[in-house]
Image: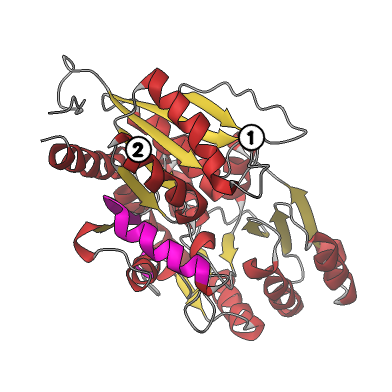
Amino acid sequence: MCQMNLPLSNSQKKLRVCHFTYSFFPTIGGLEEMIHNISIAMGSYNCEPYIFAPYVRGENNKLDVPYTVLRYSRPSSRRFGLRQLLIPLLWHHIKYHFDILHCHGVYPPGYVGASFSRFTGIPFVITPHGGDIKTNTHGFIINKRITSLIRQTFQAAHAVTAISSDIKKRVLHLGATPNKTYLIPHGIFSDGFKVSAEHQQTNGNDSRYILYLGRLEKDKGVDVLIKAFSAVKKKHPDIELRIAGEGKEINTLKTLADRLDIGHSVHFLGIIRGENKIQALSKACLLVCPSRSEAFGIVILEAFAAGIPVIASRVGGIPDIIEEKVNGLLVETDSPEQLASKISLLLDDRELRKYLVRNAFIAVSGYEWSFIVKQYINIYSKICEKTCI
């Protein structure tokens, strides 16, 4: 009989959850934000979250957060490779006595987590975030050997959670056990957007800029947006495009805007967070998410909460969030013509904008972190009950 800490009453000890990730703050992205937010939300449910994350070289790794961050150095030995991470993970477990290991990414966190679980008997959960399970046309990840390791890891997991229907299909294809695989989307703290009821109804019609928020990488399709904006500009000469984010494609995108003679109307804002992001969203006339690949699309929920309409690619996890012409508009990937047409439609149709915004604001309530985190805790509790009898 083992001791377990289930989050059932205030009189019990807190459930100690270790989130194992291959990337975290000060690196900024969807994965990092999700782990941060779920850890904050868990604090309200008799849970004690820990984050086991790598040092980020050349950056300040100290964080002012209401949870414990345990840093590790990336593996330096080719001979022992990822097994090196077991040593600090086991050391922290001896000190803090984790009840659950939640691995964000199947490889390497899930792979290492499987070994940790064998050593300690502590159950582990895997949440892939998309990039860690990208496959080629033959269904292999990187190579056959890695695919084999991933299959073994999924099969060893006590539970696998998928952030979208698309991810769930992929993990099942890669060996996850169906009755141990759960669909749990990302969440949002919508109260932080402080949207006024008046703005939700008027949809910020005084604003004259389209917004993109995200990484500036090839798979995000920002080049498609710039091409579409060039066509929109001919019909709406006063409209602007604001692009928030950083990435290796930034110079290519600036060159494209200049070549299309719209550089004066395309503004690159860099990374924006917190209040600056909320302001940028709430004052935009619409958000565009033109991704070629997107595991989920948290920025879409943020736009929903901010009271602005969304146009996004029909790819990955996005169709889980957007219902065409109900709470947003969908376009096919790599189609600047179709995207330009949908943008013009929204700019010209005030009533459609208001209709989409109203429905989106209702939809976002189902993605509140307070609701999402309960689903994780239910899985943790179920696993503990099974493994600790």
In depth, the one of 212 and 215 nearer the eye is 215
Which residue is depicted at the point 85% across and 77% down?
Answer: 260
Q: Tell which residue pokes out farthest to the top in this image.
A: 11
> Up-down: is 288 above or below 376?
below
Residue 149 occupies quadrant: bottom left
Quickly name the residue at label 2.
119
Give coordinates of residue 32: x percent, y percent: 54, 42
Nearest the eye: 214 or 260? 214
- Under circle 2, the secondary element is helix
Circle 1 or circle 2, nearest the eye:
2
With 188 as the anchor, is 233 left or right in this view?
Answer: right
Q: Look at the image and give the residue range highlighted in magenta.
A: 145-166
Quarter of the figure with residue 119: top left
- Regarding residue 18, the answer to whether it shows in the image is yes
Q: Residue furthest front?
A: 79
Which residue carries the number 1 mark?
73
| Residue 282 visible, this angle | no
Task: Point out residue 133 in the picture as x, y percentages from the top left corner.
Answer: 49, 65
Q: Quadrant of the C terminus?
A: top left
Q: Amino acid at mark 1?
A: Ser
Residue 56, quarter of the rendered image: top right
Point 80% across, 60% down: residue: 250
Is 2 above or below relative to 105?
above
Magenta stretch holds residue 147: yes
Is 290 included in the stretch rendered in magenta?
Answer: no
